[in-house]
Image (cartoon, rainbow, N blue to C red):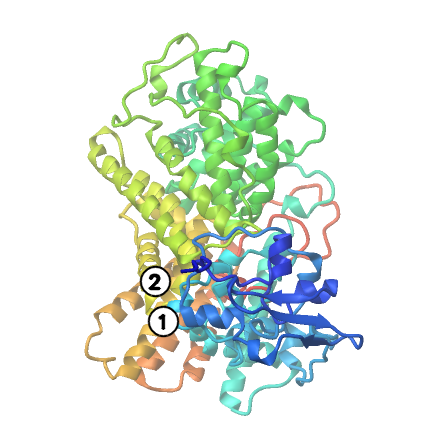
Amino acid sequence: MERQPRRRRRPALSCLECRRRKIKCNRSEPCAHCVSAKLECTYKVYSDEPAIRYQPRQDGLWAETSSPLARVPSPLAQVQQLSTSRPITQITDHLSESQVGISSSSSTTAAPAGQDGSPNILGSKDTQPPNRAQDVEPGLVSIMQRGLRPDKPSAPSPINGLSESGREILSRQLGLQDSQIILNKTRILGWSLRIGTAPEFAPIVACYVAAASTAKGTPPQDTELGALHARIWTLMQKCKGMAKSTKIGRPSRLLSAPDFDLTPPSREVADTMATLYFQSFESTHRILHAPSFWKDYQRFWDHPESITTDLRLKVLLVIGIGSSLSEHIDRDAGLRNTVQQWVYAAQTWLSGPLEKDRLDITGIQIYCLTILARQIFSVGGDLVWGSIGSLIHCAMQIGLHRDPKHMPAMSTLKAEVRRRLWATILEIVVQASLDSAMPPRISFDEFDTEAPSNVNDDEIDESTTTLQPHPKHTYTSTSMQLILLDLLPTRLRILNLLNGLHSELSYLDALTLNSEITDQYRTCSGFMRENEQAGVTAFHRNLLDYLVRRFLIPLHCPFAGEARSNPLFYYSLKVSLDSAMSIIRPEPDEGFSRLMAVSGGMFREGMRYALTVISRELIAQAEAQRSDGTLHRNTQYIQLLKQAVNDMLSLSIERIRKGETNVKGPMFLSMIMAQAEAIEAGTECEFKVAQAAKDSLELCYDILRTRIGTISSPCPTNTGLTPTSLDGSQGGYGLDLDLDWNFFFPGASFS
């Protein structure tokens, strides 16, 4: 008997031409590449089945040349019928330029036309009537419509949904084509942050759009609701004006060099703050060798006239970072502004052109301290990814990426300091990459520096010639850095799948990486609990937990968002909620609580992730229980979520008191609570949401007015020239936005 040919196990979804050229096929009929190249587009799912051919005609149209008898469903339809999953990870080659901006009629949705009525990507005019709110907030309406419009592509069946990658899910939710991106003002908003545009937030979106519309004199028909919207917009503009007035004297606003106040606090206060730094941040970010620093610190006070600029900046940065955990910063309202001056001074010193004396270990230490301080004190904390590129280059130029054993002979202390610094830089890189949703720009192929030795600082000095590292199960001052270093490979893989240009995160990838990182961290967490007597504090456990656990929310966010329509993704929703609750409710510790109340950068971003997950779950759960008729039968879970949102609301108001100038965080949380309460009461939520927004803005306005009246921000004597924009949109570092609208509605200008 003649042997039957072996059938390909996995159906071929791409056309033959794209498979031959090994490029990504958009699976249209014909596909975008063949349309652009004017080639015959042929699909053949299995080798033993007839092919479907599309050929270009003279009139520019395409004709199917297959026999009608040979006509079979499209490849995508066949795969859906067969419920065949795609590979775990599909790393595609570069897209051809012809694919960008081409719409697929079978599986994608066209992006909305430009605001000026220009043709959209399909070449047709947008015939929808203009929206007055869009004149006030350019780009706002179209971005919101991507997440809330009813004509979005529908989700596939639950089984077939498992074959979608995270990028495909988010693109479907936002109505994006292949290779399209979203700009947040001037910056790319990476896909790992596109978790806004949720239908649960529709009443809040509507309230804000209505408030913005009042600026054009178009209030809604309900006069009472219209008055609320007008008041909301007026209060927002007042708060924005007060925020601008606090930023005029910033050094980053000056064209010429400002004069910085580099005077330290009293010796007693400085000693306390420097000690707090070594007891807290130095545990995970090994930047300094403690005995060496304390010698320089003593010299700083004994002979201030002979102190060099680099030593002065190093000491001031250590004092400033430690002040974020000190009670003194609560009593001295101007200390935060003073520390920000030190951070500006350090950044200016690092940015000096052609200064080779800064390209050394001390310069790298100051660079790391500056980046850490910028995030703690919100001095351009969301822009550190760009600065880290320069840090990596400087570190590699002095050879930190090569292990000291490959270099000329040096002391054991210097070798260990170099290894610690490189491990610290790697940690800073992965954290900034997660926050900015940008590639980490480092791989294990680019360095061979070994891990630091597991020793305490007092066990090594300039006279040390040989080291006897402790076993890994023994806790030392380097243990936490070694734990983070062990978790680095898994976190780098997560970042590459989340932020890589051509990488695609599948659900199996997410589950595999989640299992790896949780298994590793479970072991490390047990180690930390066992060594409490050796010096491990609640702050250490909270900081380590925060730096690791926050990677899980972006990892699961595209799949968690689908869990309500596809129960097969429920595990992602559970992991996201567990991680979010752990982030907002850490182990009780006064210092860590104070840090989360004043810090920006990576310390704010994790809170932002957690807030999004919890607030969306609160609204979704309330609506689900109301639909099921079980809303008032079992309220424990909803009460837990409401308490979590209330805790975040209290924290966001405290941030305003501590120096934050963006009032949209408290306003959003207040609107969420009002919406949830309206759902529970079974009433319309529009008025309650607007009333909550107005009340929150009035409270924040009073706080800002009181704070500005009591704090005199140090203004440099050299005023120079200021930029035309005072809202931070052009240059400068500016205070970071706290839980801002741009996160929930990417690309919208909510300034």
Q: Give the image location of residue 747, x and y in percent.
A: 59, 64
User: On the picture, is 638 further left or further right than 509?
Assistant: left
Residue 156, placed above or below residue 445: below
* Residue 573: image tag: 2
The residue drawn where x is 37% and y is 21% is: 453
Q: Secondary structure at mark 2?
A: helix
Tell which of 71 and 686 is nearer to you. 71
Residue position for label 1: 564
* Residue 55: image tag: none
Q: Secondary structure at mark 1?
A: loop
Tell which of 107 and 460 is nearer to you. 107
- Residue that protrudes farthest toward the front in the picture: 1
Q: Give the image location of residue 230, x and y in percent.
A: 56, 80
Packing grade of label 2 (10 A; few <14, some 14-19, many >=20) is many
Amino acid type shown at disc 1: Arg
Tell which of 473 and 130 is nearer to you. 473
User: On the picture, is 669 further left or further right than 425?
Assistant: left
**Image quadrant for the N terminus?**
bottom left
Tag 2 near tag 1, CB within 8 Å: yes
Q: Give the image location of residue 383, x and y in percent.
A: 58, 47
Q: Which quarter of the picture shows residue 557?
A: bottom left
Residue 210, placed above or below residue 88: below
Distance from disc 2 to disc 1, alpha carbons, whole Å, reads 9 Å
